[in-house]
Image (spheres, grey):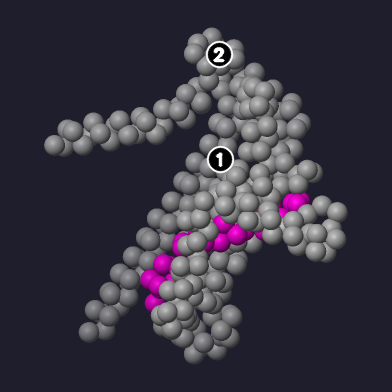
Amino acid sequence: MKRASKIYTALMMIFLFAPIAILLVFSFNEAKSLSVFSGFSLKWYRELFRDTETLKAVRNTLILAVAAALISTVMGTAAAVGMNKLRNKYLRTALDSLTNIPMINPDIITGISLMLMFVFVGRLFGAATSLNFGTMLISHITFCLPYVILQVLPKLQQMDKALPEAAMDLGCTPLRAFFKAELPEIMPGVITGMIMAFTLSLDDFVISYFTSGNGFQTLPIRIYNMTKKTVTPKMYALATIIFFVILTLLLISNLYDEEMVQKRREKKLNKKQAKEAKT
């Protein structure tokens, strides 16, 4: 049974990571072929850094992803704090359900509905163009928010409820108590939520496609437009760079979480030892 489970796990890992491994290998291929590795070369990386349109799309994508991640993290953390303080269980259940809708709803439905709303509001105010960077940013914040809330809310529920009260008893205002006592405790959830928001925004195509204007093109839309003709191996090089950037962010997030867990364990152990010493 153990042997079968190991074989199954190995097959699953191969199935998941074989396409990425092929992409990484052939991004260093000298020729365009995806079947024959003719020799190691950085040719496609050089070609990538000469492609001004693709680099512009990368810059646009990063600007959008960073802005969406920061704004959704602030809004999501504030929303999670508010939801955590609710005492009416029916209202809280309703808010939880509303939070889950953007995640459950198909991207194409979300994209079309947001596009129609932006066009309607634009025409209502007589705007020349209804879709632009602002509409894409609002759209990305909309679908990133639930993921931030779902990362921060469990941390708030795990936190010692007496922490903010103790801080206020020592003279802190409610806002200062949040920044001094609560925020350090929920920071792993905030960081994880921000990284998730960044990667989701970086990866999104469907919603971006429906809410983007003519003057602002993200990388997924750029790649989609290229597939109408042909995708050159420089896209493999770009995908390799993005893969390692996301992998680095994931490792940083995991290391930070482990560090915070270790600090909590040490704090609990110190408290326990202090109590034993008093008795």
Q: Is residue 39 left or right of residue 45?
A: left
Q: Element type at marker 1?
A: helix
Q: Is residue 242 above or below residue 257?
A: above
Of 28 and 141, the residue lying toward us: 141
- Mark 1 and mark 2 in contact (Cβ < 8 Å)? no
Q: Residues within 10 Å of mark 1 (few under 14, many from 20)?
A: few
Q: Is residue 75 above or below residue 36?
A: below
* Residue appearing at x 67%, y 23% in the figure: 229
Task: Judge by depth and name the residue closer to the eye, 226 or 86.
Answer: 226
Query: In which image quadrant can residue 2 be found?
Result: top left
**Residue type at numbered disc 2:** Ser
Taking the image as shown, residue 226 lies to the left or right of residue 216, namely left
* Residue situated furthest left in the rendering: 1
Mark in the foreground, 2 or 1:
2
Q: Is residue 254 left or right of residue 76?
A: left
Find residue 81 and report its horizontal and vertical position in percent: 51, 74
Which residue does the image show at 71% across and 47% down from the upper left?
212
Q: Which residues are magenta?
A: 131-160
Residue tagged by mark 1? Answer: 245
- How crowded pointer 2 is (Cα within 10 Å; few <14, some 14-19, many 20+) is rated as few
Q: Tell me which label, 2 or 1, sits earlier in the chain.
A: 2
The residue under label 1 is which amino acid type?
Val
Q: Secondary structure at mark 2?
A: loop
**Left or right for 9, reference 136:** left
Q: Tell me the tag on residue 33.
A: 2
**Place of residue 168 in the rendered image (x, y in percent of width and height, measured from the top left):** 51, 87
Residue drawn at the location 80% of the way across and 64% of the way down: 124
Q: Position of residue 57 (x, y in %)?
A: 71, 38
